[in-house]
Amino acid sequence: MTIYIFAFIIMLLIVAGMAIGMIVQNKPLKGSCGGLNNIGMKRDCDICGGDDDECEKEQERQRQVALAEAAAESDLAYDATSKQNKRS
């Protein structure tokens, strides 16, 4: 039974060490295999066709759509706690 506890503690220390290392480095996560470029599939992308600028434009377009949808949803709500809605 104690071997399981010991193994669990070791795994927690490893995960905590990796998390602290990522926080200290302040770098974004990246894949270890190189992504679609290394296997020759990037040019087959249906959205960008292998053009990184097109991918960036599409991601920005999707962000704008999500923001617009969020704004439209907020118009449908009623804030009962707002001072503007209280009657004197």
Image (cartoon, rainbow, N blue to C red):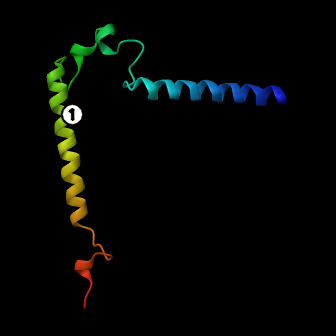
Q: Is residue 74 above or below residue 46?
A: below
Picture coordinates of residue 24 (x, y %)?
45, 26
Q: Is 4 displayed left or right of 70 in the figure? A: right
Q: Residue furthest front?
A: 24
Find the residue positioned furthest to the bottom: 88
At label 1, the amino acid type is Gln
In the figure, 2 relative to 78: above or below? above
Q: Quadrant of the C terminus?
A: bottom left
Task: Measuring from the top left, give residue 54's x and y in whole percent.
Answer: 14, 25
Camera-nearest residue between 55 and 3 = 3
| Quadrant location, the N terminus | top right
Query: Residue 4 sits in which quadrant?
Result: top right
Which residue carries the number 1 mark?
59
Depth check: give the residue in front, 9 or 76: 9
- SS class, disc 1: helix
Residue for point 36% across, 25% down: 28
Residue found at x 40% / y 12%: 33
Q: Is residue 87 left or right of residue 18?
A: left
Residue 53, position in %: x, y?
Answer: 14, 23
Quadrant position of residue 87: bottom left
> Residue shown at 73%/25% (left/top)?
7
Front residue of this view, candidates 43 and 17: 17
Q: Nearer the viewer, residue 11 or 47?
A: 11
Instruction: Return the x and y of residue 72 as percentages of the image width and height.
Output: 20, 59
Residue 33 appears left or right of 53: right
Q: Residues within 10 Å of mark 1 (few under 14, many from 20)?
A: few
- Residue shown at 19%/46% (left/top)? 65
